[in-house]
Amino acid sequence: MNLTIRPIVDTDLPSVAELESQLFSHPHSIDQLQKMVAAHESCWVAEIDRRLAGYIFASFGGGQADLLIVAVDSKYQKQGVATRLMEQLIDQLHSLLVDSLFLEVRASNQAAIGFYRQQGFSEIGVRRNYYPLSSAIREDALLFKKDC
């Protein structure tokens, strides 16, 4: 497996948006993704043999960062892609003197929660009724923090 991590470029966005729509019930639109890239957020893609395997987006400022998205194509999950993306992000945040990385995750997403804990994140709170499940039902978000 030839895994490469590199900064995202505009030509990646259609593939990222397509994968986003496959993985998430409420995906970001290509316009939202373009705005994140244009705002100079930390945006990285993972490629395996020149095919999109995953991506990570974070925003940062004032010594703190927020993990916005981390996603891995289902055919590449459990192969270290998310770990490599997270390592790339953390390396960048260290160089920017960021102290803490925050995220929120659906309370039902046990796979992601396990991954974040494995990466050294600690649960610090709950946002009640944060994520939409349907028009009338919402789900809690668990808040996590990692010291960089």
Image: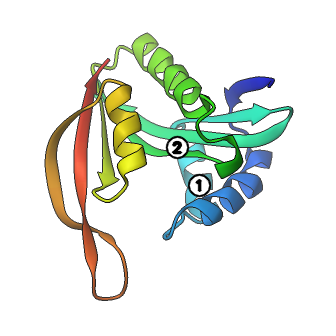
The quadrant holding residue 107 is: bottom left
Residue 112 drawn above or below residue 27: above
The residue identified by callout 1 is 33
Name the spot of residue 42 as percent of width and height, x first.
52, 33
Q: Is residue 76 left or right of residue 33?
A: right
Residue type marked 2: Ala
The quadrant holding residue 135 is: bottom left
Numbered label attached to residue 91 = none
The residue identified by callout 2 is 39
- Residue closest to the eye, 36 or 148: 148
Q: Is residue 12 left or right of residue 56?
A: right
Q: How is the image coloured?
A: rainbow
Q: Is residue 41 left or right of residue 34?
A: left
- Callout in the foreground (1, 2): 1
Q: Residues within 10 Å of mark 1 (few under 14, many from 20)?
A: many
Query: Is residue 113 in sight in this rendering?
Result: yes
